[in-house]
Amino acid sequence: MEFRYLPMTDGDKKEMLNKIGISSTEELFSDIPDQVRLKQELNLKKPLSEPQLMKELTNLSKKNSSTKTHTSFLGAGVYDHYIPSIVDHIISRSEFYTAYTPYQPEISQGELQAIFEFQTMICELTGMDVANSSMYDGATALAEATNLSAAQTKRKKVLVSKSVHPESRAVIESYSKGQRLEVVEIDHKNGITDVDKLMKEIDEDTASVVLQYPNFFGQIEPLEEVQKLLAEQKTMLIVSSNPLALGYLTPPGEFGADIVVGDTQVFGIPSQYGGPHCGYFATTKKLMRKVPGRLVGQTVDEEGRRGFVLTLQAREQHIRRDKATSNICSNQALNALASSVAMSSLGKQGIKKMAWLNMQKAYHMKQQLNKSDIPVVFTGALFNELVIDVNHSVKEVNEKLLEKGFIGGYDLEQVDSHLKGKMLIAVTEIRTKKEIDQFVEKVVDIRG
């Protein structure tokens, strides 16, 4: 329905006061000392009728710039992708959006099966054996993976490539303090991890190496090369990966990754001001009892009928605190459901085609930039993001692009002063050839 106000009448107030045995609202707050009470009216506008308020809020919202009003080339972890219309229809069903932790399997089979299907699809995409029911976001999942690697190897050093998303690196740094881990960042070279510097840092106390695939700059990291170098070191390989890219790229599991994490925002979850998201956590069978959060398993009941239950819950709510692997006590079931519905709707071939379109359109963008003499900073293989040199303040360029109907790319100077004037742009499957060509034209005009 369009209007959702539930007005409260004087009769409603009186009934509530009578129910709790008092006669006035003043009496309700009588325990609050008079000297700390506000002695004046709040500086608020006068109340409006519901239609008037809706009109005012609508007019305010029209002042925002969004992916509905502007063509977006902004990515850097949150992307403007196609979302099948069926996603909203399914997640708006009350049995899903009001569901909480499915502790009672006899009444939670629908929710449990939805999570189980999510886990299954994540395993298929990543090439891993086991996936959990989801996590808060990709950065949280990555930090949990580093903690797991330290606990598993009994080592305290974690090597993190600087081509990993800077916000994910910050979360790893925060998590590391509690576990007293040493986090060493490895420089990138031409947009990918400097493997020579990586190998010089590996020693007997190195628990894991953390890479992103595709990485923060959109480049494809050499996972196979790194894993071969790690094979004799007993150092774990942790990969943070865009699951959409895995619809086309070789999954990290085939390169021997120990843990694969990421964010499923690319499947069915709008950008919505940067959150909420849905992280995934996938690993090998060997590590399944160390996975944070919760897992849903498939079983049969007394009559042999297929059923689903929460299983292998290695968190402090269910086992001794000193034996717990994580303090993560929840998951993102509703967003995981949105991603599951999106993946199911697209199907295997649809996801592959969607990933292929991202790559093809990004390469078209790269060709147009080269033709227009706008430098593409890194030359390696890419997925759907690339770094360009705008030769100006990226902030100022983006302000001018906004005036022309475009949301520009991410200003890399915010995370690395050496990347001043460099913009990270994302090209997804919903960007048209015309939009890409127009964007390049506008950048050329602004850049001069």
Image (cartoon, rainbow, N blue to C red):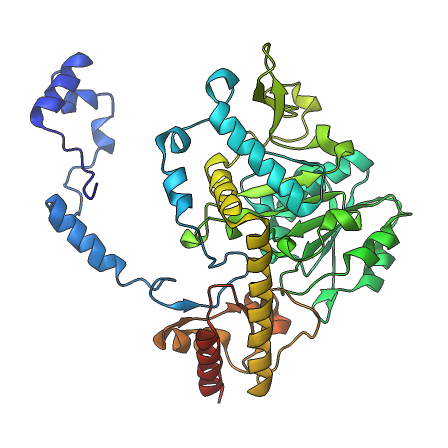
Q: Left or right? Give the position of 404 relative to 129.
A: left
107 or 100: which is nearer to us? 107
Name which residue lies at 55% across and 44% down: 137
Residue 151 vs 58, above or below: the answer is above
Q: Residue 352: percent from the left, percent from the top?
A: 60, 56
349 or 98: which is nearer to us? 349
Number of callouts: 0
Name which residue lies at 15% across and 49% down: 53
Residue 330 seen in render? no
Q: Quadrant of the N terminus?
A: top left
Q: Residue 324: percent from the left, percent from the top?
A: 67, 25
Q: Quadrant of residue 326?
A: top right
Name which residue lies at 66% across and 50% down: 240
Q: Residue 410: percent from the left, percent from the top?
A: 52, 67
89 or 225: which is nearer to us? 89
Residue 225 seen in render? yes
426 or 339: which is nearer to us? 339
Q: Left or right? Give the position of 400 relative to 33.
A: right
Residue 230 vs 4, above or below: the answer is below
Q: Residue 47: percent from the left, percent from the top?
A: 12, 44
Q: Quadrant of residue 413?
A: bottom right
Residue furthest to the bottom: 448
Q: Quadrant of residue 245?
A: bottom right
Residue furthest to the right: 232
Residue furthest to the top: 302
